Amino acid sequence: MSVRAFRGAILSVPHDPAQAPEAVRHEPDGMLLVEDGVIVARGAYDELAERHPGIAVETLPGLIVPGFIDAHVHYPQMDRIAAHGEQLLDWLDRHIFPAEMAFADRAHADRVAALFLTELLRNGTTSALVFPTVHNHSVDALFEAALARDMRIASGKVLMDLGPQGLRDTVESARDGSEALIRKWRGRGRLSYAVTPRFALTSSDAQLQVAGDLIAAHPDVLMHTHLAENERECAEVAARFTDAIDYLDVYDRFGLVGARSIFAHGIHLSDRACARMAESGAGIAVCPTSNLFLGSGFFDFARTTAHGVKLGLGTDIGAGTSFSMLHTAGVAYQAALMRGHRLDPFRALYLATAGSAALLHIGDRAGALEVGQEADFVLLDPAATPLLARRTAGATLAETLFALQILGDDRAVARTYIKGQCAWNRDAA
Ligand code: GUN
Ligand code: ZN
């Protein structure tokens, strides 16, 4: 059995502060005891050290927080970040679909998957819900690379039978490919499968029904798609699905709205859709850097929170502009303020960790550094840059956390631990 002990300032937010005011857990001088990658004790250093005499303790200078959980990101798009000039539908046609076509080559998928996971670790992200491409082997490439790194990753072949030439599957290949991948990957390592229709516009009704059938047949899988991101997209959905009450209802009619459903964006949602989302237990991956980059709009934190919709945070690389969940949290604050809502830095940390974990149904294993959870954590450096060092000198915990979100990025991630093992060390890189 491997036993490791870590000493440092520990901060986590296991519950949504918007619902539970006592949600923040902070030990200024804390200790984590880890056995075989799982946290077996957490508390004040003095107390725990006394209870476990003689144990070798590694002191970590900085702020220990749970590993970040990116609730929506596209690995094949990492080389297309910063593609200039278009909103969603034209951006997909001009920049993204050509990039995804290159994944017909398995070796290319392997290379990008490895680089992608390194980028996650550099940014302190230890888990993610990931869009691959329509190609079955794009899932294999990602899952094999994640298995080798023992990372907690969810993904599933993209369904898109109405996609562009060269990037289309069919109703049958969507069903057969997804079934085969579920059989192949179920229960392996820390991986989970997500049935992944790209969005309403790229699937036929028959294929959306296949997605619904897959979810009904496999209650352990997730459902991952895009929802109500961009005005032109919403208009095209309304024009095609004239019987549906709204965009969410399109998915609902095919059995795609439930407690294991994760919808990216949700910028343009009615009160009805928010209420239905909350009632079903479905969640939204909020992706603020993407929403700004594509001119999609500003997420309505006040309205979704009032309805009790489950929220997490996503980078949405490559429409998103940073792999950093710290930076994404900082932009979430600014996007919220555009609608008059003051996103609290502790709530932003919750969204980037336990909130996203709840969306991915991994909250029992990750996201809050609770006893019984896996020891995926990040060591943040509040003095990572001269400006951060000045701003955080003598600052309160809330001020420090907010400064890390506004000024921080991968430079502020000193180390990333996967199950108690250092998987990224900034100063050794
Ligand atoms: N909607 C459908 N496909 C995509 C995609 O790849 N990125 C984003 N941001 N929205 C989408
Ligand atoms: Zn996306």
Image: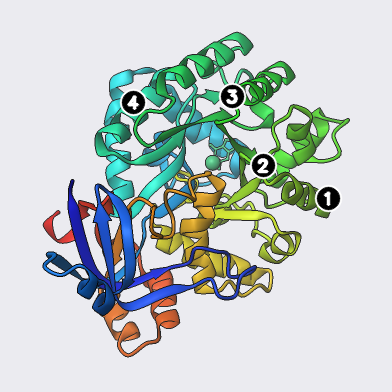
Q: Is residue 5 left or right of residue 251?
A: left
Q: Which mark is residue 218?
A: 3
- Asked if residue 322 shows in the view, the reply is no
What residue occupies the far bottom of the structure in this picture? 394
Q: N-terminal of the two: label 2 or label 4?
A: 4
- Rounded to the nearest angstrom, the CA distance separating label 3 from label 2 is 22 Å
Q: Is residue 359 above or below residue 99?
A: below
Kindly report the distance in space between the C-alpha atoms of the residues bearing marks 2 and 4: 26 Å
Answer yes or no: do the residues labelled 3 and 2 have beta carbons within 8 Å?
no
**Label 1 crowd (10 A; few <14 / some 14-19 / many >=20):** some
Dot 2, crowdedness within 10 Å: few (<14), some or many (≥20)?
many
Identify residue for label 4.
141
In the image, 128 versus 135, the foreground residue is 128
Query: Disc 3 or 2, which lies upstream in sequence?
Result: 3
- Relative to the observer, which residue lies in front, 29 or 171? 29
- Indicate which disc, 4 or 1, sits on the residue closer to the N terminus: 4
Residue carrying label 1: 272
